[in-house]
Structure formats: structure tokens, C-alpha cells
Image (cartoon, rainbow, N blue to C red):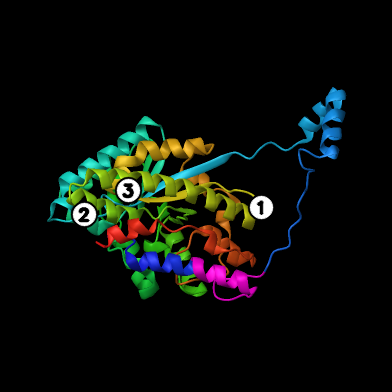
């Protein structure tokens, strides 16, 4: 793994556990929260006499049925933006087959082809050190992401953890991260619009987070959010091991487990956001440029469509008011935005309901 290694996996898991503990204890601990008072509309059960009477009344009075249909609010449209971190390739390396230019090119080609085939907008966040590791092939791969419905974003120069940087260090990561992509984007008549912090560490203090967002704004950026985490980096580590061992049976098994887990996570985070906000804002899916996603991208996109999502750009997704809120809290961890919104609103959530990748995947990834 390159981006979200075991440390990042631990912090996300820790946040879920802490959120769960705070919920069970009813406290307002680090990542817990106070309970939320909600109002719920209840309908009688379908089989009850009251429900039957209601249905007969509506059937006998077409005008009433029409009035009810006109008065009912339209079902909210589900939207999702697709994003990829660690372009041009998560395992980019000047040496080794698994991280070389040919493998990186094949992975990019497959993912870009799937996105274009299904007409899906996507934003690819570039880590400058990965570009340099691939030599001349690095910039060439990025050009495919700088046209049509695809867009480039900044993921920093060295994939540095902002928790260990002061604001000047963060500024250097932002500026140095533009070395390849800013000239490329501007030459195409486009703008760099989004920066995503590695590990989603957006500021471990309120002061740092606010200073970082102000710094990004001065450079023309908005902070890129993320609301759905599929833990693809865990599955990818296992997938790379299966590829290295030429284990086709295990490779296919990991692909299916990854898609099943993705379906579960999409549903979980939709429920989380709805619980916290009272509605589903446009979702933002966080993925990585790796061979696992290259092999499964067409299937993953179809799976998402089957959940009644429409694909939108990151810019459209983050036009929702929920993403424009000024931060009032900070965390040294990198949870998805639903957990952050819960903390901001002091909404108690049970993070233990979120599923981790299957244990066998994690064990296989670790060589056990």
C-alpha cells in the first residue's frame, strides 16, 4: 500500500470505534456526540385496518388521490461524484514491475476507458512524487485526465501528513504539488479547483484547519471532501499479492468481495448522512488509482447506478450547502464527512455499525 496503509486504516477504524463508544455511553467524548431530537412521521402498517381504510378512501376519491400526489414532495435525486487519489498510480515507482510505467499505464487506461464508456465525470488527485517516479510516463498519463468529463486535482507534493506540518509546511505541499499539473491544466484552458489532503487530515486543530482552508482559497482551491470510504486500499493490498502470486482464483474472489463491500458501504454512508443531516447530500466516493479498481471499474459503476445514483462532477456535488459550512471542530483522524457533520451537530451515531473489510482479506493482504 502507498496511500492509506495500515496506519490510515487504524485511524479510520479508531474513529468508528470511538464514535460507537461515545454513542453507547451517551457522552460527548472526542468523537462521540450528544443525542439528537428528531421528529418522525409514522404510517400504519400495511396490513392494519387503518391502512386498509385509508387505501379505500383514496381509491374511492380520485380527486383526493391526485391532491395527495401533487402535495407530496418529489423523491430526492441521489447524486454521487467519483474521485481517485494518488494519480498517476498509487504504487508508482521507478523500479519494480508492480509500480512501473507499464503497469501504471494499463491501470489508467482501464479506468479512464470505463469512465468514458459510461460517461462518468471524475476528479483525479495527483501526488507529484508519483508523477516523478514514473519519469516521462507520469505527465503523459495525466493528460488523459485533463479533458472531457475528467478533471485533475492537487493531492500534494510528497503525500505528507498535515498533522506533522505547520501552515508553512502545508503551503509548500500545495505549491510543490502543482509542479506538473498547474501548467498542464492552464494550457488546456482549465483551472485547478480542488485540493485533497492525504489521509483526509484537514487540520488537527480548529486554528490549523481554518488557516489551511484560507491558504487553499488564496491559491484558488476548495477543500475536497469525501463521504464514502470503501477501504479499497485494504482490498488492493490483497489484490496485489494475488497478482504477484498469479493466483487467479484468489484475484477473482477479492474482486467480488470488494464489490460486495462497496455496496454495503454505499448504503451505510447514505444512511449515516441522512441520519445526521435529515437528507442525502450528493455523495463523494473516495477511490485510488490502482489495479483493483482498473479490473472492477465497469462493475462498480454499474453497481452504483443500480442504487439509483446519478453521476455528477465534484464541483456540482460540493455546491450543496452541507459542504460550505465553516468548521467548528477538528480531529487528528481522517473520517468521512458524515462523521464530521455528526460531531459538528452533536448528533450521536453508532460507528460500530460500519463494516470493516472481511477478515480473510486483511489476513491475506498481510501474508497470513
- Dots 2 and 3: beta carbons under 8 Å? no
Q: Residue 95: give x, y in percent of width and height.
A: 12, 56
Mark toward the start of the polypeptide (1 vs 2): 2
Label 2: few (<14), some or many (≥20) within 10 Å? many
Q: In this orientation, which residue lies closer to the viewer: 35 or 340? A: 35
- Dots 3 and 1: beta carbons under 8 Å? no
**Quadrant of the image containing the N terminus:** bottom left
Q: How many marks on residues?
A: 3
Q: Which residues are magenta?
A: 16-34
- Dots 1 and 2: beta carbons under 8 Å? no
- The numbered dot on residue 92 is 2
Residue 221 vs 208, above or below: the answer is above
In screen coordinates, is 324 left or right of 171? right
Q: Nearer the viewer, mark 2 or mark 3?
A: 3
In terms of image quadrants, where is residue 46? top right
In three-dimensional space, the C-alpha distance between marks 1 and 2, rounded to whole angstroms, equals: 41 Å
**Which residue is denoted by mark 1 in the rendering?**
278
Mark toward the start of the polypeptide (2 vs 3): 2
**Which residue is denoted by mark 3 in the rendering?**
254
In screen coordinates, is 54 left or right of 330? right
Mark toward the start of the polypeptide (3 vs 1): 3
Q: Residue 336: give x, y in percent of width and height.
A: 49, 59
Amino acid at each position: 500500500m502507498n496511500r492509506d496503509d495500515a496506519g490510515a486504516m487504524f485511524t479510520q477504524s479508531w474513529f468508528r470505534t470511538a464514535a460507537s463508544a461515545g454513542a453507547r455511553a451517551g457522552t460527548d467524548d472526542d468523537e462521540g456526540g450528544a443525542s439528537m431530537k428528531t421528529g418522525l412521521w409514522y404510517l400504519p402498517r400495511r396490513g392494519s385496518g387503518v391502512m386498509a381504510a385509508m387505501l379505500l378512501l383514496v381509491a374511492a376519491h380520485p380527486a383526493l388521490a391526485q391532491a395527495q400526489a401533487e402535495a407530496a414532495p418529489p423523491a430526492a435525486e441521489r447524486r454521487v461524484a467519483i474521485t481517485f487519489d494518488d494519480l498517476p498510480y498509487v504504487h508508482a515507482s521507478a523500479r519494480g514491475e508492480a509500480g512501473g510505467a507499464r503497469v501504471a499505464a494499463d491501470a489508467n487506461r482501464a479506468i479512464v476507458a470505463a469512465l468514458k464508456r459510461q460517461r462518468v465525470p471524475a476528479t483525479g488527485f495527483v501526488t507529484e512524487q508519483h508523477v516523478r517516479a514514473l519519469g516521462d510516463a507520469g505527465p503523459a498519463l495525466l493528460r488523459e485526465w485533463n479533458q472531457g468529463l475528467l478533471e485533475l486535482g492537487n493531492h500534494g507534493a510528497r503525500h505528507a501528513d498535515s498533522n506533522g506540518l505547520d501552515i508553512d509546511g502545508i503551503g509548500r505541499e500545495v505549491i510543490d504539488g502543482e509542479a506538473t499539473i498547474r501548467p498542464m491544466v492552464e494550457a488546456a484552458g482549465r483551472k485547478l479547483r480542488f485540493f485533497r489532503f492525504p489521509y483526509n487530515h484537514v487540520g488537527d486543530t480548529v486554528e490549523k484547519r481554518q488557516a489551511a482552508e484560507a491558504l487553499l482559497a488564496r491559491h484558488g482551491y476548495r477543500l475536497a471532501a469525501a463521504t464514502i470510504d470503501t477501504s479499497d486500499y485494504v482490498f488492493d493490498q490483497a489484490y496485489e499479492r494475488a497478482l504477484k502470486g498469479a493466483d487467479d482464483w484468489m484475484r477473482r474472489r477479492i474482486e467480488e468481495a470488494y464489490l460486495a463491500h462497496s455496496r454495503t458501504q454505499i448504503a451505510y454512508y447514505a444512511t449515516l448522512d441522512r441520519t445526521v443531516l435529515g437528507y442525502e447530500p450528493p455523495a463523494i466516493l473516495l477511490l485510488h488509482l490502482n489495479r483493483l479498481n482498473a479490473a472492477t471499474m465497469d462493475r462498480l459503476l454499474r453497481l452504483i447506478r443500480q442504487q439509483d445514483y446519478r453521476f455528477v462532477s465534484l464541483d456540482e456535488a460540493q455546491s450543496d450547502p452541507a459542504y460550505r459550512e465553516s468548521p467548528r471542530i477538528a480531529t487528528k483522524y481522517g473520517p468521512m464527512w458524515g462523521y464530521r457533520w455528526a460531531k459538528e451537530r452533536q448528533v450521536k451515531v453508532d460507528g460500530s455499525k460500519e463494516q470493516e473489510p472481511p477478515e480473510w482479506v486483511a489476513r491475506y493482504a498481510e501474508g497470513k
